[in-house]
Image (cartoon, rainbow, N blue to C red):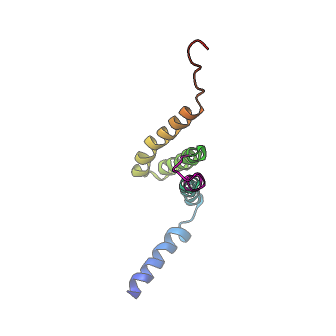
Amino acid sequence: MLAFSHDLVDYFYDVFVVRFDFWLAFGIVAQLLFTARFIVQWLASERAGKSLIPFAFWVFSIVGGGMTLVYGFKKREPIIIMGQILAVTIYVRNIMLILRKPKAPDGQ
């Protein structure tokens, strides 16, 4: 068990310290922004006493998802690329629907 914990510490040291560069920092910020959307959604829902999806949820989704997509392209990670291309498209579409001005009823 001691050897496992030592190997685990060595692994995290290698991943987060030895290999630290701009792109790792970029990826961490992207993931934090992406995660922030759930915190925003949770807090808004708690305040309202019902489940809500506030506009900020979609903003954090686009920014965090977009940054994660850029990170995936930079690191040549096909799983990240595949996961984020459709997701970012859906986030953009949701914001387009939210920002669309409602059409006036006929005759008015």
**46 in magenta:** yes
The answer to whether 11 is drawn above or below residue 49 in the figure is below
Residue in the picture at 57% in, 21% down? 103
Residue in the picture at 41% in, 87% down? 2
Quarter of the view holding residue 36: bottom right
Residue 61 percent coordinates (x, y): 54, 47
Query: Looking at the magenta stretch, what is its main secondary structure?
Result: helix
- Tally of marks: 0
Would residue 101 appear left or right of 90 to someone viewing this image?
Answer: right
Residue 91 percent coordinates (x, y): 51, 41
The answer to whether 43 is drawn above or below residue 89 in the figure is below
Would residue 83 appear left or right of 65 to someone viewing this image?
Answer: left
**28 in magenta:** no
Would residue 55 appear left or right of 15 to someone viewing this image?
Answer: right
Q: Check the image and name the residue furthest to the bottom.
A: 2
Residue 82 percent coordinates (x, y): 40, 46
Q: Which of 11 and 106 is in front in this view?
A: 106
Q: In which quarter of the image is the N terminus?
A: bottom left
Residue 72 percent coordinates (x, y): 47, 50
Q: Nearer the viewer, residue 73 or 64?
A: 64
Which residues, given as a range, are shown in magenta? 41-53
The answer to whether 92 is drawn above or below residue 53 in the figure is above
Quarter of the view holding residue 7: bottom left
Residue in the picture at 48% in, 38% down? 89
Q: Check the image and name the residue furthest to the top.
A: 107
Q: Quadrant of the C terminus?
A: top right
